[in-house]
Image (tube, rainbow, N blue to C red):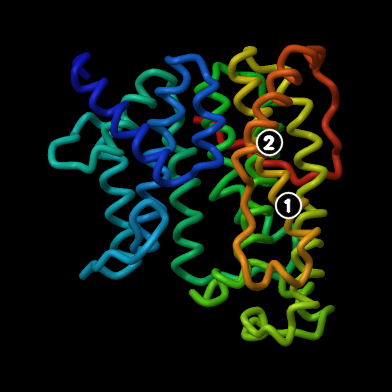
Amino acid sequence: MAAGETRDVAAFAARSIAAGSKSFAAAARLFDPATRDSVMMLYAWCRHCDDVVDGQEGGRGQVASALSADARIAGLRRDTHAALGGQTEGLDPSFLALAEVVRRHAISPRLLDEHLAGFALDVAEHRYRTLDDLLVYCWHVAGVVGVMMAEVMGVTDEAVLDRACDLGLAFQLTNIARDVVEDAREGRVYVPLDWLAEEGVGAPDLIDPAHAAALARLRARLVAAAEPYYASARIGVDALPRRSAWAIATARLVYRRIGTKLVAAGERAQAQRISTSTPEKLAAIASGGWAALRFRDYGGLPRDPALWTRPRLGG
């Protein structure tokens, strides 16, 4: 890709992350420039895929499409592999961004396919019986992104990549906890069905204010399930280059804060979308910087064997 084209794609990716995720955008500014460009370009592809499947733009609104959801996923697979093969003519800029990231960092196409498989689960409105079942979904839509992001940061150690996956899992569990009602309105239920049965509620009850107390307990349970993965990811941060460690430590603090606020809100979270304020983000940036400077003794500490572990794909 020519220098001018690379700059154009990087600028497109920066706009994509600014529109799609204020939380991650704040952390992404902390990377060194080269890593930041690659992280944003990978994010742009992930965001585009998510929007195409959901019929949205920047994670919001609805965009009309004559294609079925299955056809949209097939198109994403086709365009992704076309871009990897150098056939970028007429493709959305997000595929040019992806091709550049893969060129720079040798991201495995199998990881990209794993991510696209998560969108297929969404289209099928798949539901999950147990927490382990849900974690497989979280791997597809977020854990694999954590692995790819870590590879962009120069990580090759499988144990560190496991912890990058852990952070993606924790992020997704937090997102699921926050968006239970919004997702249920779209026909998507991610809360383990066994948990719903224990509360004596069904999927339709998730949007019923009469069940706000049960929903608050389910949110708290999801947040609690994320905690050991946040803790595992915290150790992995110490294996990253300092600027990357600062960015990832900040993102970890911001997302974890959303979870603690959800639990604190209890039943009140039913009627509002929980997010972090600007002062909270600034505090996370400061704390993340301190963590990146202070804690640097990774030393290959063993990961908790009780945690769900990503598949080894190879290739």
Q: Residue 247's spot in the image, x, y percent?
A: 60, 25
Q: Quadrant of residue 123?
A: bottom left
The residue positioned 80% from the left and 46% from the top of the image is 227
Q: Quadrant of the N terminus?
A: top left
> Is residue 306 toward the left or the right of residue 168 in the image?
right
Residue at disc 2, secondary structure: helix
Between disc 2 and disc 1, whose residue precedes? 2
Q: Which residue is depicted at the point 47% across and 53% down? A: 117
- The percent position of residue 119, horizontal first and vertical second, equals 46, 57
Q: Which residue is mark 1?
A: 259
In the image, residue 208 sits, relative to residue 292, either above or below, namely below
Residue depicted at 65% across the width and 85% down the height: 208
Residue 152, placed above or below residue 304: above
The residue lying at 38 percent from left, 39 percent from top is 44
Label 2: few (<14), some (14–19) or many (≥20) C-alpha neighbours in 10 Å = many
Rendering quarter of residue 177: bottom right
Q: CA distance from mark 2 to mark 1?
A: 11 Å
Tell me: 121 left or right of 109. right
Q: Furthest-left residue in view?
A: 89
Label 1: element kind? helix
> Residue 290, how many percent across, how many down?
74, 18
Q: Which residue position is annotated with label 2?
A: 252
The relative height of residue 113 versus residue 55 in the rendered view (above or below) is above
